[in-house]
Structures are given as structure tokens and as C-alpha cells.
Image: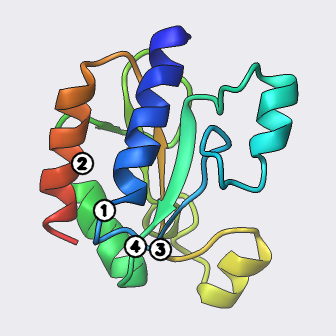
């Protein structure tokens, strides 16, 4: 779990500073609304799962998911290998934007489950995928 938590924080920081990323939610980030709770209940870690959003909505999210090479495209989360899903084009594809929002999601959300791969490899895969967004 230490490697997963360290990788997840590094990925969250990378995404937060990326020009093609609109938002990142990760409790390990100091400015995240759940950071105080993570400090209290998770010893400062934010878990291995993090969502982020892309300008360009549903289409951009689907393009990024399709472009990932190291991340495995799966809807389950929590593994030693890194996984990714774009709910608006996979598990929730039948919902329009309003229905997706009512379910607590958005068209631009890509959800990552970070694994134990080398952080440089994870960043490189995300970088090349974001170039396609």
C-alpha cells in the first residue's frame, strides 16, 4: 500500500499541474476538501483511487481512455496494477449529462486506480494519453 499511496499522490500532483486537466480530486492533496479527513483517518494518505476531469467532456475522456497503454481499461478499482475507466463512455454510457450528474458523476471524469508500477512509466503513459485529449 505504501507504493500505491506514493504513486497516487505523485500522479495526482502531476495531473493537477497538467494544462489539459480541468480538475483532480485526491484526498492526499493539501487543497482537496477531504484532505483533513485523510489526515485524521488515513494517516495522510488519499488511497489509490483518484478521479480527474478533462475539458472536452465525454469525447475527451473517451479519447484519453483509449490512448492509455500501461493502464488497464477496467471498471473495477483496487489492484496492484494501474487501472482506468471513463464512466460516461463505459458503465454509465446510457446516461445523458443530467442523469450522470444526478448519479454523482460528470461526462469529463476519468477514474484511475493507481498500482505499483514505476511512477515514471505511469506519468509517461498519462502524458501521451493526455496529448490525445
Q: Nearer the viewer, mark 2 or mark 3?
A: 2
Tell me the CA gap for discs 4 and 1.
Answer: 10 Å
Q: Could you say where residue 73 lies in the image, as x and y percent from the top left?
A: 34, 42
Task: Judge from the rendering whether residue 1 lies leftward or rightward of residue 69; answer left or right.
Answer: right
Sequence-wise first label, 2 or 3:
3
Tell me the CA gap for discs 4 and 3.
Answer: 5 Å
Q: Which residue is mark 1?
A: 18
Q: Could you say where residue 9 lies in the image, as x and y percent from the top left?
A: 49, 34
Q: Which residue is mark 3?
A: 108
Q: Residue at x 52, y 77 (%)?
A: 107
Residue 10 visible at all:
yes
Q: Could you say where residue 49 lies in the image, as x and y percent from the top left?
A: 57, 37
Q: Residue at x 59, y 86 (%)?
A: 96
Quarter where residue 33 is shown:
bottom right
Quarter where residue 10 is shown:
top left
**Mark 1: few, some, or many residues within 10 Å (few <14, many ≥20)?**
few
Q: Which residue is mark 2?
A: 126
Q: Nearer the viewer, residue 18 or 56?
A: 18
User: In the image as oriented, which residue stretches furthest toward the front?
Assistant: 30
Sequence-wise first label, 4 or 3:
4
Tell me the CA gap for discs 4 and 2.
Answer: 12 Å
Considering only vertical position in the picture, is 100 above or below 45? below
Sequence-wise first label, 2 or 1:
1
How is the rendered protein coloured? Answer: rainbow
- Asked whether the beta carbons under mark 4 and mark 3 sit within 8 Å of each other, the answer is yes
Amino acid at each position: 500500500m505504501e507504493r500505491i499511496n506514493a504513486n497516487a499522490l505523485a500522479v495526482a500532483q502531476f495531473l493537477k499541474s497538467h494544462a489539459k486537466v480541468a480538475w483532480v480530486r485526491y484526498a492526499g492533496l493539501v487543497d482537496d476538501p477531504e484532505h483533513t479527513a485523510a489526515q485524521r483517518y488515513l494517516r495522510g494518505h488519499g488511497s489509490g483511487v483518484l478521479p480527474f476531469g478533462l475539458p472536452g467532456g465525454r469525447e475527451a475522456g473517451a479519447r484519453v481512455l483509449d490512448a492509455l497503454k500501461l493502464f488497464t481499461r477496467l471498471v473495477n478499482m483496487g489492484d496492484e496494477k494501474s487501472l482506468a475507466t471513463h464512466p460516461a463512455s463505459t458503465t454509465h454510457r446510457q446516461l445523458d449529462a443530467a442523469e450522470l450528474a444526478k448519479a454523482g458523476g460528470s461526462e469529463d471524469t476519468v477514474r484511475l486506480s493507481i498500482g505499483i508500477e514505476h511512477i515514471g512509466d505511469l506519468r509517461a503513459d498519462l502524458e501521451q494519453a493526455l496529448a490525445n485529449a
